[in-house]
Image (cartoon, rainbow, N blue to C red):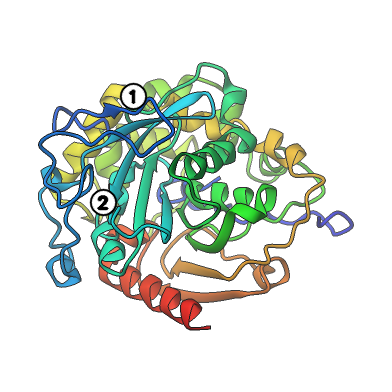
Amino acid sequence: MATSRSVRTPTTLSRKTGHGVTGFGWQDGGITSPTRSTTSEHPRPVRGAPTSSPGTFVARSPRKYRGNAMPNPTDFPKPTLVPVNGVELEVFEAGRENAEKPIVLCHGWPEHAFSWRHQMPVLAAAGYHVIAPNQRGYGNSSRPAEVTDYDIEHLSGDLVALLDHYGYEDAVFVGHDWGAFVVWGLTLLHPDRVNKVINLSLPYPERGERPWIESMEDMLGGDFYFVHFNRQPGVADAVFEDNTFQFLRNLYRKNEPPREPQPGMALIDLARAETPLGEPIMSDGELAVLVSAFESSGFTGGINWYRNLDRNWHLLADVDPIIRQPALMIYGDRDLVARGANLAEFVPNVEVVSFDCGHWIQQEKPEETNQAIVKWLEQQDAT
C-alpha cells in the first residue's frame, strides 16, 4: 500500500459542488415483481417475461439502442431475488444462453441496475451472460439495518457469492461511481474471482496515510457531502426522501452551466432546488423508474456505503494494493470526479479512454460506452 507517501487528495474531491460528484434501486414501481430464488441453481424464471430463454430478455441488435433510443422501461429484464452472503439481491439478466462468459455490472449512487439498460442488450449480443444486481441497500435487494453491513467486505462478498450462485469461478466486472469503488475493492480482496476490470468515472482509490473521511474533513470541511453523511447521519437521507423526484431530476443532468461554490451542503441544496439546470439525461419514463425505486427503498442503504469509507480504509490496510488484471478506465471529460494521477502505478495493465460528457457516462454516452467496452473486450480475448 501507499504508506510512506505524503497525504494525497482523495481522488473524488471537488470544491465546486456536490452535484455530479457522487462516487466513494429501482424498485420496479409495479412494472415487474421479483421472483425469489431459493436454491443454488439458476434463479427460477419469471412468468410473462419477454424472453427467448427463462428469466432473460432477447438480445437485440445494438442498432436498436443507438443514442438515447432506449426501449420502454417495461422492456427491461424481469428480476429475480437471489440469496447471497446472508442477504437477497434483486438481479437482472441478459444473455443467459452465453454460459461461461459472465460479466457483472455494478451500479453507483444514487443509481440502480436500470442504469445499465443501454449496455445489457449490447453485451448479451456480444456473447456475454450479463448479470446486473441491485446491490444491498437498493431496489428490492436487502437493506440491513447496521451501518457496518455496508463495508467493502460485505459488498465484495455479495459479488463473490453471486458468482458462486451461478457456478462461475470468475467474471469480468464493470463498475460505475460507487460500483467502481466496489469493483476495485473486490479485485484487491478477491483477485482470483476477477479476470478483467472495467470502471467508469471513479479511478483507483489510492489509500493515503490517513483515513479518507478524516482527510476530506480537514481539506473540505464538514459541509462536504462525504463528511456530512458521516458526521450528521440521517439529515441528508431525510431531505432526499422528502424531495425524491426533485433530487433525482436535478441530479441527472448534463451540459450544466458553471456555478460558483456556495456555502452549505451542496446535495441538500440540490434536492431543494425548484428549477433544474442543464439538460436531462433521461426520459420522463426512465426517471420515473428511478424515482419509484427510491420512494420505496429510501436513500439510507446507499448512503451507508459512504459511512464505511474510513472502515474500508482500515480493512484494506494489509492487502496487496496492485491491480494486476487487465483494466479499462473510462472517464467523462466534464466529470467533476478527479482523474487518478497515479492510476498506472496501481493498475499497470490499464487502458484509458474518455468521452465528452459528465458523470453519468454510460447513460449520457451509451453508444460510445458500448463500443469502447465491446472493442476492448474483443481485443483482450484476441490476446
**Which residue is most to the right?**
4
Task: Give how far across and how far down residue 102 sits, in percent.
Answer: 42, 57
Disc 1 crowd, CA 10 A, few/some/many (<14, 14-19, 20+):
many
Q: Is residue 354 left or right of residue 31?
A: right
Q: Is residue 37 above or below residue 368?
A: above
Which amino acid type corresponds to the residue marked 1 in the rendered image?
Ser
> Where is residue 320 drawn, in percent x and y?
78, 55
Residue contact at pointers 1 and 2, CB within 8 angstroms? no
Vertical arrangement, residue 341 with respect to residue 259, above or below? below
Q: Which mark is residue 277?
A: 2
Q: Amino acid at mark 2?
A: Leu
Q: Nearer the viewer, residue 15 or 208?
A: 208
Residue 45's quadrant in the figure? top left
Q: Tell me which residue sits at (38%, 78%) in the image.
A: 375
- Residue occupying the far top of the picture: 145
User: Can residue 348 be seen at all in this image of the molecule?
Assistant: yes
Q: Nearer the viewer, residue 338 or 169?
A: 169
Image location (x, y in percent) of residue 151? 61, 33
- Seen at 43% across and 44% down, the residue is 166
Q: Going by the image, does 161 lie left or right of 49?
A: right
Sort mark 2 into few (<14), some (14-19) or many (20+) by Cα contacts within 10 Å: some
In this rendering, which labeled residue sits more in front, label 1 or label 2? 1
